[in-house]
């Protein structure tokens, strides 16, 4: 009789545990999904990652002798938890040698992976943002895609 009571109690606890874990999984966001970073303009970490992406782009591009970029700001950002944190950044930068005043601001898409436990960050890709159909900005011809 005591064995039957223990078995029944175990089944009831298992049932409630399953219900609680399932309902909490559906109420939150999906693991691995992209989330918007709030207050991007004042988020020091995100702005530092934008500066890092432009610096890294310039470092890799300098070997080709192409025009360099000057970091302005990160306009928007998303983050995704992977094996580290993957940041999707919209970086605004000045392109040297274009426009009448010598510089023109353009928007670039950058992907940076940060692994805090290793104190590492790496630039995965950096490319001109594709313009909307009615946009005047052609995105420039600077492009870097790191695989």
Image (cartoon, rainbow, N blue to C red):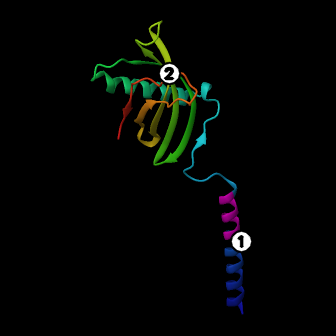
Q: Is residue 55 above or below residue 9?
A: above
- Number of dots carrying numbers: 2
**Front one among 35 and 67:** 67
Magenta-span inclusion, residue 104 = no
Q: Is residue 9 above or below residue 116?
A: below
The disc placed on residue 16 is 1
**In x, y percent, where is residue 66?**
32, 19
**Which numbered disc flags the more N-terminal residue, 1 or 2?**
1
In the displayed structure image, the side of residue 71 where residue 20 appears, left or right: right
Q: Residues within 10 Å of mark 1 (few under 14, many from 20)?
A: few
**In x, y percent, where is residue 141?**
40, 24
Residue under label 2, please give it.
106
The magenta region covers 18-26
**Front one among 2 and 123:** 123
**In x, y percent, where is residue 17?**
68, 69
Q: Residue at x 59, y 28 (%)?
A: 43
In the displayed structure image, the side of residue 31 where residue 103 appears, left or right: left
Q: Is residue 42 above or below residue 19?
A: above
Magenta-span inclusion, residue 19 = yes
Q: CA distance from mark 1 to mark 2?
A: 54 Å
């Amino acid at each position: 009789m005591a064995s039957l009571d223990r078995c029944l109690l175990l089944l009831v606890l298992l049932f409630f545990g399953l219900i609680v874990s399932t309902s909490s999984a559906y109420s939150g966001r999906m693991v691995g999904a992209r989330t918007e970073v709030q207050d991007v303009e004042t988020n020091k970490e995100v702005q530092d990652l934008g500066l890092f992406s432009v610096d890294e782009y310039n470092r890799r591009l300098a070997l080709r002798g192409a025009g360099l970029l000057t970091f302005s700001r990160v306009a928007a950002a998303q983050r995704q938890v992977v094996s580290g944190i993957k940041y999707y950044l919209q970086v605004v930068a000045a392109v040297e040698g274009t426009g009448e005043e010598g510089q023109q601001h353009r928007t670039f898409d950058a992907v940076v992976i940060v692994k805090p436990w290793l104190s590492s960050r790496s630039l995965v890709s950096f490319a001109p943002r594709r313009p909307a159909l009615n946009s005047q900005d052609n995105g420039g011809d600077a492009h870097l895609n790191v695989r």
